[in-house]
Amino acid sequence: MSERDTGAGTPPTAAPERVSGETAVGPEAVSGGAALPAEALRIAAGYAFAGPALDLGALLWDGRCLPDAQIRVPLPMLNRHGLVAGATGTGKTNTLQLIAEQLSAQGVPVFLADVKGDMSGISAPGVPQEKVGARAQEVHQSWTPAGCPAEFLALGGLGHGIPVRATVTSFGPVLLSKVLQLNQTQEQSLGLIFHYADQKGLELFDLKDLRAVVAFLSSDEGKQELKGIGGLSTATARVILRSLTAFEAQGMSPFFGEPEFDTGELLRTAPDGRGLVSVLELPEVQDRPQLFSTFLMWMLADLFHDLPEVGDADKPKLVFFFDEAHLLFTGASKAFLESVTQTVRLIRSKGVGVFFVTQTPKDVPADVLAQLGNRVQHALRAFTPDDQKALKATVKTFPNSGYDLEEVFTALGIGEAVVTVMSEKGAPTPVAVTRLRAPRSLMGPLDTAALDGAVRESSLYGRYAQAVDRESAYEKLTAREAARERAAAEAAPSSPPPPGKAPATKGRPKEETSVVEQVVASGVFKSLARSVGTQIGREITRSLFGTARRGR
């Protein structure tokens, strides 16, 4: 790459010395060998961090790989969030694997959404190959095969992993409106339904619970109860019911219910101190992108309102990789986008770093993109006018550099990327075209038998494998309706006596209770009354997304 090609035609300035602690780190310390070109030396100096860091690869400059110029990202800066982007087949998955391995090795738990089903190999040592060996030698990587401690999860139990479910109450009205594809008015009405259920102690564990509450509130009796807090139109209730019915018909019921997955499980470490890598298997739900992307947001929101503030820690509590991130924002309401932005902005102080994984930065709303300080951009294609527009937009999201980024982005090879991260001082590092290191774990899916064995041996298997159906809103409302029908039937007057004959009353004890009194005294009625009565005025605390806070 010539100076003309890279846009580095101005005379290079001398590389400034970098001070780490009390030791001056000059050009020789950065290069560790032969002198680097001045511009390359300036870039390399921007990545010579004093504290713990992850090694991404070696600098590419003027067509050469410079292994003495290592490109790194400071460990404490991983909670400043990030973006891993690039066209299909450019190496994004291997980049996630590379970063996840090093985080785990430094005791940081990792969450990976495995959309294609090829990330389970992170738990097994890699296989030595000629290409891997050549890449390691080229970037001065000491490569030895090694796997990570891993936990395998599956959304709704569809797949090999441990089932991940959420209760409808915990999922909340905003997220549920997105997967039901409701408009703003319908979303607000759904929020009203949740508000009522929260106040009345009607637990919404699964979809049939929500359906029962919607049906009740659209009835004559239910409408009277809603008058004090706002009305629910019959038309809107019918739309919500139709959406719920269609949603269930698509096989969505397994994703909602109990036992609900405790997202605190994602924060665990292995006995040897390494961070646990939680891999959420998603191939079985690839055709339901609205569902799985919203479920990922539920997990993040659940972590957000349960974790305490930690400020700037030495290392993150968790790094959360949000794959296929563009699906999260497609068709999202304004309220939803505002909640995403707020969650991403605030969760940093709770020690969680979020990496969005997608094709181009333009897939992420500007307010969210502005918070992603660490960027790894793989190759982009420019075959169509839309591609060219996306390419120009991507270039504008990077700091000024000595590279012609429009040319670089289309010329990057597999396993190469343009990198800029947050330095230890919180400033962006120079843009660096990087040849990335090779992952040390298996690059590909784990054998099915080994995967099933790992799932069954997990300590979580007994806790989450079997679904349960406790008494909740559906059962309570069904019991109340049945009790009312019995009371009405038995309290109705019997056939009138023949003319001239008075009703027989002789012999009936005065103390005999009416049928209505018997129903009120029944165990079912008392159970319902206790449940409703103790909850009135104690509405569930909800977060930005309307997700419900749970006790840990």
Image (cartoon, rainbow, N blue to C red):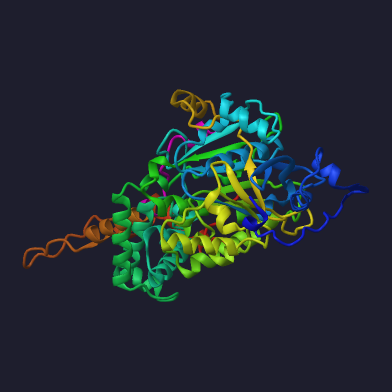
- Residue at screen point 59% across, 60% down: 343
Q: Nearer the viewer, residue 42 or 56?
A: 42
Locate residue 122: give its quadrant. top right
Q: Position of residue 341 (x, y in %)?
A: 57, 64
Q: Which residues are magenta?
A: 460-475
Which residue is found at the position 26% from the left and 58% from the top?
485
Which residue is painted at 62% across and 33% down in the image?
135
- Nearer to the camera, 231 or 537: 231
Task: Inspect this view and state whether residue 103 appears.
Answer: yes
Splitting the image into 4 quarters, where does residue 58 fall?
top right
Left or right placement of residue 195 versus residue 13 in this view: left
294 inside magenta stretch: no
Q: Residue furthest left?
A: 499
Q: Position of residue 269 (x, y in %)?
A: 66, 36
How many numbered tags mark residues here? 0
Q: Residue furthest right?
A: 22
Q: Residue at x 61, y 58 (%)?
A: 404
As for residue 472 lying within the magenta part, the answer is yes
Observer-nearest of 373 and 309:
373
Q: Is residue 144 left or right of residue 118?
A: right
Q: Is residue 457 above or below residue 21?
A: above
Does residue 32 appear left or right of residue 285 in this picture? right
Report which quarter residue 442 is drawn in.
Answer: top right
Residue 40 rendering spot, x and y as whole percentages: 74, 50
The front one of 263 and 367 is 367
Q: Is residue 552 visible?
A: no
Up-down relation of residue 279 to residue 441 (above or below): below
